């Protein structure tokens, strides 16, 4: 068993570092590869992504703690709960950010697919953030189920657990390599590969986390499933449109 | 023709920065520690809690005001234009110019 303990102070440090590193990667990529949209449009996309991610991560985080939300609603402490720290989820942030960007693109007439520049920065940012989750240990709700495997980690309670955060960092390294391959990708494909694979990954890995289940899966897994279905449906819609345009020529 | 006010102010940039600031300050955990320890025992967490409170309040207020002003100025700006055309949040010419350079 690998002793790690629980050090919650590292969570905010690594989370802040994750945002900074992710943004640095995004800027470097944009400088190197150029952008398919102009600077004002890119900022519109970034603003929509940031607001959407904020709302999405908080909404899903709070939905996960629904008994607390109902109690806060009854006692009139809803604002206090909304502004209380913690209770954010990456899946909610990704889905909220994606939805926010799609709405902003529709409203401002952006027709290009703008997510490719975010694929690698998101892989790196989430991986850095997960180091914080691992170090926070039992104080964070992302630890794994007990296991007898030789690489089990002891988060301070003497129980060997799956290092699910390390599994995720390795997975993100793999996805990061895939989405940066220099082959020709259709516009938007790198982001969609990242998003689809991350949602699929969370759908599977969350079975190794001791969280309350609803009909066999936790709320994050149900959200991942919904996100994957929307992604597939949207890809089919785009493919159908392209096919019809080609047939009409 | 002079540039409209909504085009002169970088609303998108301000909103993005404020949203990230609010997101980061929500995750600082200092406030949780101070509250859970009944007022806190000094050190890094009290400072973090204070920083978290100030940045949360400022960024949340700033975000609401900026979003409201952005929507309002965009709506007001669209009154002066042909109402049958969709309102753009950016200069379309710039997109075309940029695309040609790629």
Image (cartoon, helix red, strand yellow):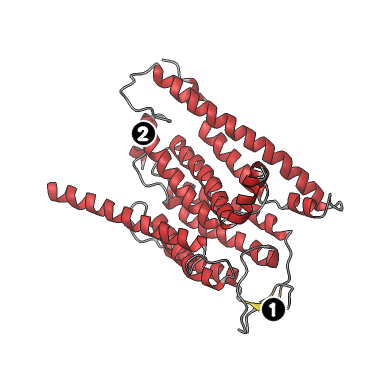
**Residue lying at 74% horizontally and 73% vertically, measured from the top left:** A156
Q: Secondary structure at mark 1?
A: loop
Q: Residue B86: image x %, image y %?
A: 34, 28
Question: So how many labels did they put on this image?
Answer: 2
Q: Is residue A131 left or right of residue A171?
A: right
- Horizontal and vertical percent position of residue A167: 55, 72
Confirm whether residue A33 shows in the render: yes
Determine the CA span between mark 2 and mark 1: 60 Å
- Residue located 64% across and 55% down the image: A15
Residue A180 in view (yes/no): no
Up-down relation of residue A245 to residue A219 (above or below): above
Extreme residue in the right direction = B41
- Residue to which mark 2 is pinned: B97
Q: Which of these two is toward me, B20 or A213?
A: A213
Which residue is nearer to you in this view: A4 or A20? A4
Q: Is residue B90 left or right of A84 when viewed as pictured?
A: left
Please tell me which residue lies in front, A150 or A138: A138
**Would you name the residue on which mark 1 appears?**
A159
The residue mark sitting in front, 2 or 1, is: 1
The answer for which chain carries disc 2 is: B
């Amino acid at each position: 068993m690998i002793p790690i303990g629980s050090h919650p102070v590292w969570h905010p440090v690594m989370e802040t570092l994750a945002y900074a590193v992710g943004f640095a990667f995004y800027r470097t990529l944009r400088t190197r590869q150029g952008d398919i949209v102009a600077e004002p449009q890119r900022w519109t996309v970034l603003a929509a992504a940031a607001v959407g991610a904020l709302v999405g991560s908080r909404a899903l985080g709070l939905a996960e703690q629904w008994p607390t939300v109902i109690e806060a609603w009854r006692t009139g402490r809803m604002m206090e709960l909304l502004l209380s720290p913690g209770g954010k989820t990456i899946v909610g942030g990704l889905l909220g950010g994606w939805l926010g960007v799609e709405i902003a693109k529709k409203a401002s007439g952006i027709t290009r697919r703008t997510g490719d520049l975010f694929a690698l920065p998101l892989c790196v940012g989430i991986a850095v953030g997960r180091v914080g989750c691992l170090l926070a240990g039992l104080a964070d709700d992302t630890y794994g189920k007990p296991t007898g495997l030789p690489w089990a980690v002891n988060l301070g309670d003497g129980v060997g657990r799956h290092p699910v955060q390390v599994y995720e960092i390795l997975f993100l390294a793999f996805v990061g390599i895939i989405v940066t391959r220099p082959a020709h990708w259709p516009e938007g494909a790198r982001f969609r590969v990242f998003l689809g694979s991350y949602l699929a990954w969370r759908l599977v890995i969350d079975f190794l986390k001791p969280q309350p289940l609803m009909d066999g899966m936790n709320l994050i897994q149900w959200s991942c499933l919904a996100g994957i279905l929307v992604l597939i449906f949207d890809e089919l819609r785009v493919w159908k449109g392209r096919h019809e345009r080609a047939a009409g020529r | 023709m002079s540039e409209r006010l909504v085009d002169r102010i970088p609303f998108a940039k301000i909103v993005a920065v404020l949203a990230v600031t609010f997101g980061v300050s929500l995750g600082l955990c200092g406030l949780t520690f101070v509250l859970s320890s009944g007022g806190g025992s000094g050190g890094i967490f009290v400072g973090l809690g204070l920083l978290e409170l100030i940045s949360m309040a400022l960024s949340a207020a700033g975000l609401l005001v900026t979003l409201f002003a952005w929507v309002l100025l965009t709506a007001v700006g669209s009154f002066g234009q042909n109402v049958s055309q969709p309102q753009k949040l950016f200069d379309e010419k710039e997109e075309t110019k940029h695309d040609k350079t790629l």
